[in-house]
Image (tube, rainbow, N blue to C red):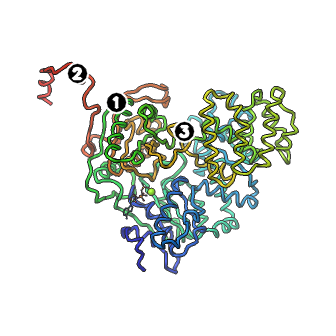
Amino acid sequence: MPHPYLDGLNPEQRLAVEHGIGTTAAAPALLVIAGAGSGKTNTLAHRVAHLLVDGADPRRLLLMTFSRRAASEMGLRVERIVRKAMGAQAGVISDALTWAGTFHGIGARLLREHADQLGLDPAFTIHDREDSADLINLVRHELGLSKTESRFPTKGTCLSIYSRCVNAETALEQVLGGSFPWCAGWAAELKQLFAAYVEAKQQHCVLDYDDLLLYWAQAMADPGFAADVASRFDHVLVDEYQDTNRLQSSILLALKPSGTGLTVVGDDAQSIYSFRAASVRNILDFPGQFSPRATVVTLDRNYRSTQAILSAANGVIDLAKERFTKNLWTDRATGSAPHLVGVRDETDQARYIVERVLDNREAGSLLKQQAVLFRTSSHSGPLEIELTRRNIPFVKFGGLKFLDAAHIKDLLALLRFVQNPRDRVAGFRLMQIIEGVGPASAQRVLDHIAAAADPIAALAEAPAPPRAAADWRDLVTALQDLHRSAGWPAELERARLWYEPHLDRIHEDAVTRRADLIQLEQIAGGYPSRERFLTELTLDPPDATSDQAGVPTLDEDYLILSTIHSAKGQEWKSVYVLNVVDGCMPSDLGTGTSAELEEERRLLYVAMTRAKDDLHLVVPQRFFTHGQNAQGDRHVYASRSRFIPDRLLGLFERVSWPRVSAAAAAAQRQGPRLDIGARMRGMWR
Ligand code: ATP
Ligand code: MG
């Protein structure tokens, strides 16, 4: 049957889109493995649309992407295609795709819906990384481990080790030996700590990020549960499969043991999440996990970038040790070579970028069509200053989150505590907002209510901490009001009224922070319930903007700033990459093993392949390190990244900026001068 809405696809893409649809025989699992910009995500969207046009029930499709944003973009894309196919009959597809989200978000929903069956309290709250580290810290103190010796790993390191063991399904000793050798002497204490941490989470009725996958995977090991969950979904589709870990692949296998109805797409050359235990083996081993083996489709045409950009990106990734996907071609022959720009320091780097961004805007590019990418969030500091000075709005992805701000966390602690009064980290934070309540009093109260059947009622009866009587009563009243709930999202106003006097006392810049709280209320309006709001915000919080808070209104134009990790899957007309120097790319922290170095190379490849028309790699001669190495914060002299060795230079246009050196500019101001010496030297260059 002809399907005009699929006409724009190339034959390989079409093969993937139509795989197993309209046939009665069971089709094997499908893997689309191909390089950047070859249309993997686009193919996935067409496949979903084609399934829907073929009569699939959108509520029975499970679609997992790398971020919530990617999921909603996919929903909109699918909707456009279905409309093209079916016209007005289509209805609002993106709303009907109820199971589109991240692995973690989907895990949270399934665990809540099946909580009874799993012996979980459905009111569980979710800890973000900071809360998890705080809980580890609490437990560490209780065990006396922080006192044993000052060199015991920090709470953050403990959490990273724990997380690695869980996600890679690997024994502690092996993780220590492989990735944290300086902690190897603490194996026994860490075991004790992790056992107590797991126990504490259960008592407090909280799950951390890793638990969302771990509980889900463990539950799927039970055949009855697995059958229940699997029967909810006819099709399971996953984007960016190269960045999944073993737990995630075991979940997929349990959902679709025969592989029928399972589609995954990805690019091994873009695998950049090994620090979250993602393993490129997942995508390489995928075909052999099923019998019959999965159908593998490869795509080799790039639709995103000009040939010049693609050649440079291919040049970089060609030097990788191991690679499965092949080089791509494009028919976009036009366009200039990517610029490799030498600048003096990060200030000049910022100025160069601002100048180019404004040039491009002048030439008709929106700010939104341009993005500045960097290895680490702190690298964009000087650029942010310059952008602010020049009044250029920007949004930053992958850096400080809106929710990381202390005042937002305070207010959310109140909501979390109402949702789940056993969440001790939330309770601890909440109580200590009150003047005169320290850790010891907070702990006493939390101990008192821990065993109560109705903790909020128990709190009202608990003796008030002696130095905070009036404020304490206010808190208890607020909690009781919220517990009875004024309705969602109206209750947020009640929460804010309680918090504002404390905000004014704690923060000097209370006025701007109050504005954030109002904005939080607006964001809350987009969620159906307190529980969904807390869950989804914790799992995928909005990013901070040029005002350090909030999400900009959609009609505004703004420049994109993003870590390379957060830029996955996206594309812009112009892309600028900061600090393409050794020490940043590869990062000093990523040169320990050859596997780490290879991942840094892939990171540069990911950055370069985000560009459609215009790419600038900036190489400052000096840059500032932020305590990444033993010497702490300091300026260092840098050289061009080793990922662009001399033999690749022909693929770039080399630019030195500013074009005129400061000395020459000064000389020009003084009027023409004959520099015979320079001419003589120039004769021999
Ligand atoms: P990445 O590896 O970076 O995630 P990808 O393989 O998922 O990239 P897409 O983002 O799906 O690639 O597509 C890249 C660009 O190419 C998009 O702008 C998309 O609309 C366009 N594109 C994909 N397939 C086609 C096609 N058959 N015809 C025209 N344009 C296409
Ligand atoms: Mg993609």
Mark linked to residue 447: none
Q: In this view, does 142 lie to the left or right of 69?
A: right
Q: Which of 145 and 666 is in front in this view?
A: 666
Question: What secondary structure is found at the residue carrying circle 3?
Answer: loop
Q: Which amino acid does label 2 sit on?
A: Arg
Regarding residue 136, the answer to whether it shows in the image is yes
Q: Name the residue under label 2.
A: 669
Earlier-in-chain disc, 2 versus 1: 1
Q: Residue at x 70, y 67 (%)?
A: 224
Q: Is residue 434 above or below residue 201?
A: above
Q: Mark 2 packing: few (<14 Cα in 10 Å), some, or many (20+)? A: few
Residue 419 coordinates in the image, percent (x, y): 74, 48
Does residue 170 appear to the left or right of 7 in the view shown?
right
Residue 294 makes an appearance in the image: no
Quarter of the picture holding the C terminus: top left
Determine crowd level at label 1: few under 14, some 14-19, many 20+ residues with C-alpha closer than 10 A. some
**Residue 348 x %, y %:** 35, 30
Q: Position of residue 353 (x, y in %)?
A: 36, 37
Element under label 1? loop
Q: Gap between marks 2 and 1, in whole Å?
A: 26 Å
Q: What residue type is labelled 3?
A: Leu
User: Relative to 283, does residue 521 appear above or below in the rendering?
Assistant: above
Q: Residue at x 54, y 49 (%)?
A: 277
Q: How many marks?
A: 3
At which x and y percent is residue 542?
56, 46
- The quadrant in which residue 35 appears is bottom left
Q: Name the residue under label 1.
A: 621
Q: Which disc number belongs to residue 400?
A: 3
